[in-house]
Image (tube, coloured by chain):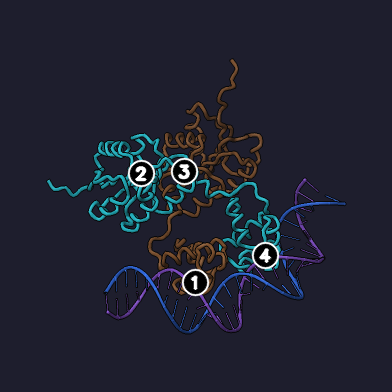
Chain colours: A brown, B cyan, C blue, D purple
DNA sequence: AACTTATCCCCCATTTTAGGGGAGATCTAG
DNA sequence: CTAGATCTCCCCTAAAATGGGGGATAAGTT
């Protein structure tokens, strides 16, 4: 019998805790479509073996010795851009989550995920989805939403948003169909309300307070 | 018997297709924790009744007559910031999705979602999650990731990223511990590579090509 | 050897920004 | 109805920032 139909998904695990790693291996082993080709306690050996392991999917922890998982994700994506990466971490703080996604992770589970949840996430990933634990998903969605209590008026917010895209007063004026003088006035008022006196500081405050 | 424990979650439906709306009503009616206090074929009447409906959760379509769902979301969030909003739409294009999330939606389902999926999403929302169909989730996650094939070097990308935050050459130099002259050189090279000759255009290209 | 990258320097003109003044129209809230 | 906020526009001026041109050196890669 010739097996050409549906090749197995090659999985690599990178997780420094031996028990957790073995647990993952066992869980994934129960699923017929996945094969764990290798597992490592650190990114360093995993990166060395990338070209022979040829993983379709990497499950990676973040807090690990030798090399941080975020750095590992970057290097894996650089070497093999098509590899799908799933983070399994205890961290639920936004910086860690966003850094991981920016680095190239497509999914992010917290460690309290149960076996079924893990397998479901793998299936979700392989069909092009982006599985996330609920806290992670809400972090991500909230990152799109701006603060509801802003000192700025709607028009000012609009001007600040264009300013943040690197537009000059002149092009903001064109975009909003108003004169450059009006743009200047808005910006002066914005600076006053945000207690700053230049563009850079205004954008730092805007970023911090989620005004745009 | 005094009922103080676990008040029902008040749900409002806004969906112009009568069949779909009735379907949702029926599905949600099967769940003991939710009560559909009202349902509307348009945002306009829904907004008028907001203060008496007092919804904890609004399920809303996007393409509707009289007022677009995005605008409806904005107004609902403005009037009742704590209301949780779930979009159920056929649209899977990124602009629509991001506009909805920016406007204040916490979840986004496509219309092929089955009844169990809908109820699961509601539960997820009420415990602070952000349920999304898998295509939507992957759109959202991908929005964090930058293009893998950039003409820019790592350092140049770094400089461009700081430029995009509104930093001046001087503060970029400080941030990267290099001289301002070096920053200028990097920026000149960036402009050449991106075929532009000013900051605004560079950032437009960067945005379009996902370089930062 | 040629190329890319990252770093730094000079000169110079133009563009952009910021701060000061004021003013009229509209709208909202007290 | 009045006071405040918002949005619009104008004048003047000076400082800050940008961009374009010319280099150069050192490290690293192909």
Q: At x 48% / y 44%, what residue is drawn?
A: B93
* Disc 4 from disc 1: Cα separation: 32 Å
Query: How far is the residue under mark 2 from the one under mark 3?
Result: 15 Å
On the image, the x and y values in percent for residue C5 come to: 71, 55
Chain letter of the residue carrying label 3? B
Which mark is first along the chain, 4 or 2?
Answer: 2
Disc number placed over residue B124 in the picture, else none: 2
Q: CA distance from mark 1 to mark 3?
A: 40 Å
Q: Which residue is mark 3?
A: B137
Considering the image in quadrants, where does the N terminus of chain A appear? top right
**On the same chain: label 4 and label 3?**
yes
The 10 Å Cα crowd at callout 1, few under 14, some 14 to 19, many 20 or more, is few
Query: Residue A69: x percent and y percent?
Result: 56, 47
Q: Which mark is residue B183?
A: 4
Labels 4, 1: front one: 1
Q: Is residue D12 left or right of residue A27?
A: right
């Amino acid at each position: 019998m010739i097996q050409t139909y549906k090749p197995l998904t090659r999985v690599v695990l990178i997780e420094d805790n031996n028990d957790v790693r073995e647990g993952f291996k066992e869980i994934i082993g129960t699923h017929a479509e996945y094969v764990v080709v290798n597992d490592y306690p650190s990114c360093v050996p995993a990166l060395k073996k990338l070209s022979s392991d040829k993983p379709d999917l990497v499950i990676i922890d973040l807090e690990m010795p030798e090399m941080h998982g975020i750095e590992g994700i970057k290097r894996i994506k650089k070497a093999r851009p098509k590899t799908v990466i799933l983070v399994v971490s205890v961290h639920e703080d936004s910086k860690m989550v966003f850094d991981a996604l920016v680095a190239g992770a497509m999914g992010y589970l917290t460690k309290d995920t149960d076996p079924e949840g893990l397998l479901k996430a793998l299936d979700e990933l392989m069909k092009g989805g982006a599985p996330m634990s609920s806290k992670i998903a809400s972090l991500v969605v909230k990152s799109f939403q701006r603060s509801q209590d802003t000192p700025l008026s709607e028009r000012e917010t609009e001007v600040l948003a264009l300013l943040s895209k690197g537009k000059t007063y002149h092009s903001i004026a064109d975009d909003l169909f108003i004169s450059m003088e009006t743009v200047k006035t808005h910006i002066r008022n914005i600076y006053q309300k945000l207690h700053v006196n230049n563009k850079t500081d205004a954008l730092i405050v805007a970023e911090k307070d989620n005004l745009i």
